[in-house]
Structures are given as C-alpha cells and as structure tokens.
Image (cartoon, rainbow, N blue to C red):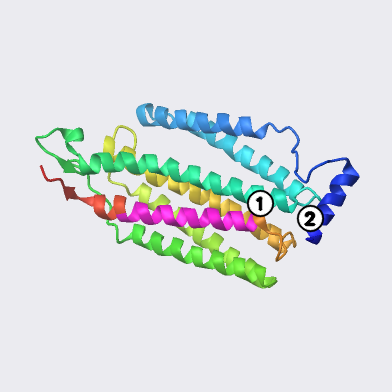
C-alpha cells in the first residue's frame, strides 16, 4: 500500500475524519472574485462607450485582492500536513484542467467574433464594400513586435519546462534559474505589448468593430500573461524557500500548465489576428 495514503488515513483517523478529502473552511474570496470579474467586464463596456475606466480599475483591484488572499489561503493549506492527500491532489489536477478548459472557451468567444467579421465583412460596411479590416484601419506589421513577442513566449515555455524537469530531478538551482528567466520573458512581453498599444493607429473607445475585437482579444491575453507571470513569481519564491519537492509540487505544475495555455492562445492570436487578419479582401 502507498505509504502516503496510509499516512493520510492515519491523519484522518486522528482528527476524527472518516475520509481522505480536505473540507475547506468557508471563504469570502469566490464571491469577491466573481463580483470583481463582473465589475471588470461592465467597466470594459463603459470604457468603450464613454471612456471611463473607473469600473475597470475597481474590478481589476478586486480581482487582484482575490488572487492575493485566496492564493495565500491555498498555500497555507498546502503546507499543512495531511490536508493535501493524494486524492485531494488528484482533485486539484482535475480542477485546474477544467479551469483551463473554461479559459479556452472564453477565448473561443473572441475568435468567434473575429471570424464572424473576418469571413463576412459585409456585416460591418454592407455588401457595397465587403473588406476586412474596414477601410481606414491601418493594422500592425505582424513581423515586428508581434513576431518578437511570439518568440519570447515560445522561449518562456521552454524555460518553464526546463525548470519543471530540474525540480523533478531534485536540482535546487535549475528551477530558480528557469523560473527567473521565464518571469523576465513574461515581463518583457507585457512591456512590448504596452509599447505596441501606445503606438496603435486606432483606438478602443469609439474605434469601431476592428479595434474592439483586436483590443479585447489581445488585451485579455495580455491580462492572462500578467496573471501567469505573477503565478510564476510566487512559484519562484516557494522554490527558493524549499516549498516544493520532487514528488509534491502541484502549484508548480499548475503554473506551468497555465503558462503553456497562454503560449498556445498567443500562437492563434498571432497567426489569425495579426497575420491573416491584417488585410484580406473578402470574395463576394
């Protein structure tokens, strides 16, 4: 029998529990996070129509608070002996998988909107001038900053994988170095995207359908990059303090999964939004 399962059973028996599952304490962070997300989405609508970013800032602040406090609680639970049993860790893997699948569907909505107007641009300007992007829109050169950002994210995916394998091999230095490089690459990506936005020849507020689709799709991806970079930063701190072992490091695995998801979404954005969607005339 697996000794970890036996230990879990002993802990459960000593605490009066009759099963190996971790029943979490009541927490306010799910509802706070949901309200923050709703406020952020409503704020995006107000920002696009009225140029008011107050609700965006409030919603983003609530989400940042939720992530900080909820992750703090999860880290405390993970370091408490007996709570994260093998069954619980399996459930965490299923949960992270479902979360990433929900994020995939989130971006499917943006790609659906993009392809709707990319393939049927007459919905934008009518049948008289069915072109995408709409007339007057000057798109980005895909092989300047977007291509550089693509290389940066692909390299960061390699360094995250390197860090993970180093951790499995019980190499104390490898995870710190690999994660450190990944964090720097993530910050560089965000900086370059900020520069790209500052040089954009079109604007989100009142700019029409193309800027709306472009900024929502790439902007939410940029937000995910920031979240993923923060995730990796927390993992770096935990790795430095010895919070991971070669056999128990689900937090690291979850961060790596999330980062690879961010990589893949960007590849689709680069190929479809930046390259194919830069200037294609539809066939009537």
Quadrant location of the N terminus in the rendered image: bottom right
Estimate the x, y position of residue 176 in percent, counting from the top left: 64, 66
Residue pointed to by mark 2: 5
Q: What residue is at 58 percent from the left and 37 percent from the top?
A: 63
Q: What residue is at 40 percent from the left and 64 percent from the top?
A: 151
Quadrant of res 142: bottom left
- Vertical relation: 21 (above or below) 45: below
Magenta run includes residue 74: no
Q: Residue furthest front?
A: 1
Classify mark 1: residues with Cα within 10 Å, few (<14), some (14-19) or many (20+): few
Give the numbered dot on residue 82: none
Residue pointed to by mark 1: 90
Q: Nearer the viewer, residue 186 or 83?
A: 83
The boundaries of the magenta stretch are: 251-271
Mark 2, secondary structure of its residue: helix
| Image label count | 2
């Amino acid at each position: 029998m697996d000794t970890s399962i036996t230990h879990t059973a002993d802990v459960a028996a000593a605490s009066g529990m009759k099963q190996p599952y971790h029943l979490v304490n009541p927490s306010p962070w799910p509802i706070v996070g949901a309200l923050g997300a709703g406020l952020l989405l409503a704020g995006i609508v107000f920002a696009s129509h009225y140029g008011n970013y107050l609700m965006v800032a409030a919603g983003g602040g609530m989400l940042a608070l939720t992530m900080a406090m909820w992750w703090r609680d999860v880290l405390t639970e993970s370091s408490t002996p007996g709570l994260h049993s093998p069954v619980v860790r399996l459930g965490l893997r299923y949960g992270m998988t479902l979360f990433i699948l929900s994020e995939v569907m989130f971006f499917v909505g943006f790609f659906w909107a993009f392809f709707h107007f990319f393939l049927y641009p007459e919905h934008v300007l009518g049948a008289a001038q069915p072109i995408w992007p709409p007339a007057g829109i000057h798109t980005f050169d895909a092989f300047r900053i977007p291509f550089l950002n693509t290389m940066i994210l692909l390299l960061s995916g390699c360094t995250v994988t390197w860090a993970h394998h180093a951790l499995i091999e019980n190499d104390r230095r490898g995870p710190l170095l690999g994660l450190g490089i990944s964090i720097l690459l993530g910050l560089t990506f965000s900086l370059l995207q900020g520069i790209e936005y500052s040089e954009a020849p079109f604007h989100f507020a009142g700019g029409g359908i193309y800027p709306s689709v472009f900024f929502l799709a790439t902007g939410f991806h940029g937000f995910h990059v920031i979240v993923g970079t923060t995730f990796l930063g927390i993992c770096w701190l935990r790795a430095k303090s010895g919070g991971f072992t070669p056999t128990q490091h689900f937090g690291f695995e979850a961060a790596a999964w999330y980062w690879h998801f961010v990589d893949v979404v960007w590849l689709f954005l680069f190929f479809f939004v930046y390259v194919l969607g830069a200037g294609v005339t539809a066939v009537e």
